[in-house]
Amino acid sequence: MQLSVSPNSEERTAGVRGRRFVAWVVVCALTQIALMEYLGWATLEGRPPAAAARLQQGNMPVVFFPTDARNWASFKLQRIADEQPEIIAIGNSRCSQLRSAMFMPYKFYNACLTAWTVSQLRDFLNRITEVSYPRVVIFSMDYFQLSNSYQRMEGKRAGTFRYGVEEHIGGIGSLIGQTIDSSGRGLEAAWECLAGRYPKHPREDLTMVGVTAARTGAGFRWDGSLIYQLAQYDAAKQVMLDFRNGLVNAIPGAPKADEEQLAQLAGMAADAEAKGILLVGIQFPIFAPTVDFLDHNEEYRPYAGAWRDFESETMKRRFTEMGIIHVDLSRAAMSKDPENFVDTSHPSEAGMVAALIEASGNAAFNAALPRLDITGLRGDLKRASDYVNHYHLYRSTFVK
């Protein structure tokens, strides 16, 4: 007798197989998600920035580096809430080497690498005052911030101040990207972090916590200052050889300073005054050959209008009228020495000490920080007698 299978029976069998396959896929997917969530929490890359920031509370040797740059602002905002500093620095990467030890006897926190455009600076200033009560806020005040072209270019870099599903997924994605890098260093760093074996920095007595810090040797110290990857320090002299690879090529030129940005700056100054904050805007040092190029290169002259406006006496009077204590260190004497820079627009630690010493020649700056230990800074600078100390002057020294 020949048995036959009805079409309905075949359909039922196919349906069972299909459901089993879907269930298998779902189980595999959920297992992978659970695994990545566990890895994200255990390696810190999947934790909210505010939770990760608490790692440094009372734990000065810890260096941590949120992988997603959008989370740097919320990370540092939590650190500010925890530490309640008297002086806070905000702005772009050019102020990232300011250290708490430079501001003795004041309590200082470096919240730079959080805001690039004037509108972002204003936003971050107001968020800071929601969680702390600083007496002085120092901000990176550069000529290019007064151009609409810079606002258009850097407006997209705004930091996020909330942590939601999108930011969480981004952190997990960053973890995956790091662990599968071709060097194998990311996977090794992830394994070490899972085992709780965090590496020491090779030049500073600091512990690199989290996959990003462990893999790159970079991150935010306890006082918010940035420790660069060693390659960035060690390649500094080569970068210096062609200054156009720095500020001039990285930042768009502009024919003039734009009133829209000046209005934002005036609004920021008004916000600070209303909250009883002394607002100190510093144009940090720029490597001297770059300044010479901005001053004199005829081909670039149509694009250096914002620079000329910023440097003019008329503009300096406007800053004073806004209530900003303005310190222009772009022509500081220390800017002639390439060892005072990481690259053409980023002073080294020793370079920052030299810059603050020169800033003390500004009467308004002195009035804002009357107890700043300039004699101590001069003594610190004398210790920067070799290459390593230029970039790692204070090492694990912090002032609480």
Image (cartoon, rainbow, N blue to C red):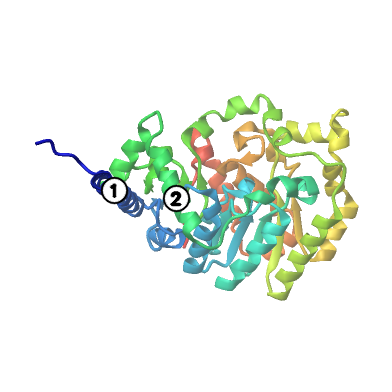
Horizontal side of 340 relative to 264 (left or right) equals: left
Element at badge 1? helix
Q: Amino acid at mark 2?
A: Gly
Dot 1 or dot 2: first in sequence order is 1
Location of residue 113 in the rendering, given as x and y in whole percent from the top left corner: 59, 51
Location of residue 361 in the rendering, given as x and y in whole percent from the top left corner: 73, 53
Element at badge 2? helix
Name the quadrant containing residue 120: bottom right
Q: Front-most of 258 and 348?
A: 258
Can you see residue 370?
no
- The residue lying at 54 percent from left, 38 percent from top is 390
Residue that sits furthest to the left in the current view: 1
| Total numbered badges shown on the rendered structure | 2
- The residue lying at 86 percent from left, 59 percent from top is 318
Can you see residue 11?
yes
- The residue lying at 74 percent from left, 31 percent from top is 289
Q: Which residue is mark 2?
A: 171
Q: Amino acid at mark 1?
A: Gly
Q: Within 10 angstroms of label 1, few (less than 14), some, or many (20 or more) residues?
A: few
- The residue lying at 66 percent from left, 59 percent from top is 138
Q: Front-most of 381 and 332?
A: 332
Q: Which residue is mark 1?
A: 15
Location of residue 49 in the rendering, given as x and y in whole percent from the top left corner: 46, 58
Q: CA distance from mark 1 to mark 2?
A: 38 Å
Q: Within 10 angstroms of label 2, few (less than 14), some, or many (20 or more) residues?
A: many
Residue that sits furthest to the right in the current view: 314
Q: Is residue 276 above or below residue 180?
A: below
Q: Are marks 1 and 2 in contact (CB under 8 Å)?
A: no
Q: Front-most of 363 and 99?
A: 99
Which numbered mark, 1 or 2, is in the foreground of this view? 1
Location of residue 298 in the rendering, given as x and y in whole percent from the top left corner: 88, 29
Q: Is residue 44 above or below residue 164?
A: above
